[in-house]
Amino acid sequence: MQAASTRGGGVAGSAAKGDGDTLESGGYHRNTSHKPMLSGVAIKITSILVLIVTTVLILNQSSYPLEFFHNHNSFPGPSCENSNADSSSFHQYTSRIPPSSPAKDEDMELEKMLRGAAMKDNKTVIITTLNAAWSEPNSLFDLFLESFRVGNGTAHLLDHLMIVAYDKTAYERCEAAGLHCYAVTTEGIDFSGEAFYLTEDYFKMMWRRIDLLRTILELGFDFVFTDTDIMWLRDPFKKFYKDGDFQISCDHYWLNYTDVNNFPNGGFNYVKSNNRTIEFYKFWYNAREYFPGKHDQDVLNMIKDNPFISRIGLEFRFLDTTHFAGFCEPAPSKTMDKVITMHANCCIGIPNKMHDLTMLIDDWKRYMAIPPSNRNSTNRSWTVPRICS
Ligand SMILES: *[C@@H]1O[C@H](CO)[C@@H](O)[C@H](O)[C@H]1NC(C)=O
Ligand SMILES: *[C@@H]1O[C@H](CO)[C@@H](O)[C@H](O)[C@H]1NC(C)=O
Ligand SMILES: *[C@@H]1O[C@H](CO)[C@@H](O)[C@H](O)[C@H]1NC(C)=O
Ligand SMILES: *[C@@H]1O[C@H](CO)[C@@H](O)[C@H](O)[C@H]1NC(C)=O
Ligand SMILES: *[C@@H]1O[C@H](CO)[C@@H](O)[C@H](O)[C@H]1NC(C)=O
Ligand SMILES: *[C@@H]1O[C@H](CO)[C@@H](O)[C@H](O)[C@H]1NC(C)=O
């Protein structure tokens, strides 16, 4: 049940190969352009020099892989003029990270769990993460589960929900609810408290999640990741786009479904397992090094139009807030007839979320109790958000 400490410990060990490839192509280029002017001896001397320089660079990069990029003075951000060159060095760094090498036992355990939870036809699982603070009795976790039960055609989805428990309390709560439970720990970190927004533990929890989701993709499973403060009121699978590798909900959806200038929210996404999404999750995870103090969603906003993404051919799809709604946009304007999920986003603190989501569930129950023939003549607006905004 124990899961790994954070991965990536093998960076230095596997660095040599990637660097070798990189520098080899650079060296080759240099040789060909100078060849005609050089005698045989000069070629040999040049080769030896190239070899020495190469070796020195490899050693440097192995010990200080990140410093190498800092010397290049930037992360390949969207505003960066020289973003092509930089992103290619970033790509090389990405490729050097070994794919989940050390933790074989853990992956087998995870795979077994995923197999049990996945939908039979298409290897899809629904994933959420949970810690003690969020799983207390009469807390967000209960509301989350209740939403599936009172939602329209969502109860069966609970069979495919896998809870990633960050601590013992959360694990026990999950077991008691009769769900698929996977315990994940990170060495030396206690995740059980409320990880207050933007504290160090919060960041570690967020990034551990991105790392785990990448492993799930590598094991060949598609997933819907959902925060626990998202109410599932209808079956989202009917509304996902047929194409697109990475579909994500939005705080603000003001453009079209392919436009990266929408404001995505990492709390809800549907990701298909393929080489593009695996590469993307590595890229996203590694990008955290360049943006210390930023959480996964901020970093996503910074990398979402990076040239790396079109190079690997990854396609984003942004989910319309009409269906995948949240408190960031005034909920009363969202008709209950169309809402599939409702997120207590733009709302900080468990008590605030609890308050408004409880009201939301009540709204929904009232709505579902109206006979369909009368629905048109009643007010189908939400009474929330109240405390959240
Ligand atoms: C996957 O299969 C399940 C039935 O096992 C179905 O309900 C769901 O809509 C399917 N999802 C996709 C994305 O096709
Ligand atoms: C619930 O789902 C059924 C079957 O898809 C549909 O006929 C009905 O209109 C839905 N009710 C609501 C309130 O969405
Ligand atoms: C979506 O927006 C982008 C950028 O504004 C534009 O290039 C693209 O053509 C639009 N696509 C659709 C399907 O409207
Ligand atoms: C990734 O690509 C390789 C070949 O390039 C292929 O064998 C493998 O099945 C792909 N993996 C996924 C998850 O698509
Ligand atoms: C509700 O009203 C809409 C138009 O406002 C109409 O298209 C729909 O058929 C009506 N539904 C019912 C159940 O009366
Ligand atoms: C429906 O209820 C909401 C919230 O109580 C209110 O703001 C809105 O004005 C009502 N709409 C109608 C058409 O009565």
Image (cartoon, rainbow, N blue to C red):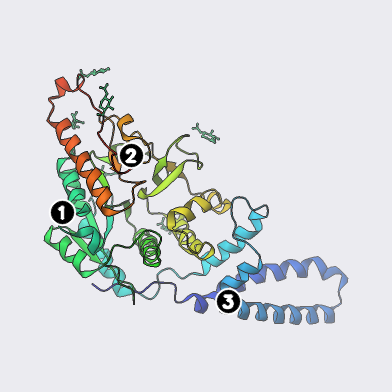
Q: Which disc is residue 356 wearing?
A: none
Q: Which disc is residue 324 wearing?
A: 2
Residue located beneath label 1 in the image: 138
**Could you say which is closer to the camera, residue 86 or residue 207?**
207
Residue at 56% in and 74% down:
17
Callout 1: CB less than 8 Å from ligand 6: no
Callout 3 secondary element: loop
Q: Give the answer, above or below, for where 88 lies relative to 380.
A: below
Q: Are marks 2 and 3 in contact (CB under 8 Å)?
A: no
Q: Quadrant of ligand 1?
A: top left
**Could you say which is closer to the camera, residue 54 or residue 83?**
83
- Label 2 amino acid? Phe
**Could you say which is closer to the camera, residue 186 or residue 52?**
186
Image position, residue 293 (x, y; %):
47, 62
Callout 2: CB less than 8 Å from ligand 1: no
Q: CA distance from mark 1 to mark 3?
A: 48 Å
Q: Toward which corner of the image does residue 169 lie, by quadrant? A: bottom left
Q: CA distance from mark 1 to mark 2?
A: 25 Å
Q: Earlier in the sequence, mark 2 or mark 3?
A: 3
Q: Are marks 1 and 3 in contact (CB under 8 Å)?
A: no
Residue located beneath label 3 in the image: 64
Q: Are marks 1 and 2 in contact (CB under 8 Å)?
A: no
Q: Give the answer, above or below, for where 161 lies relative to 57.
A: above
Residue at 61% in and 63% down:
89
Direction from residue 5 to residue 90 in the image, left or right: right
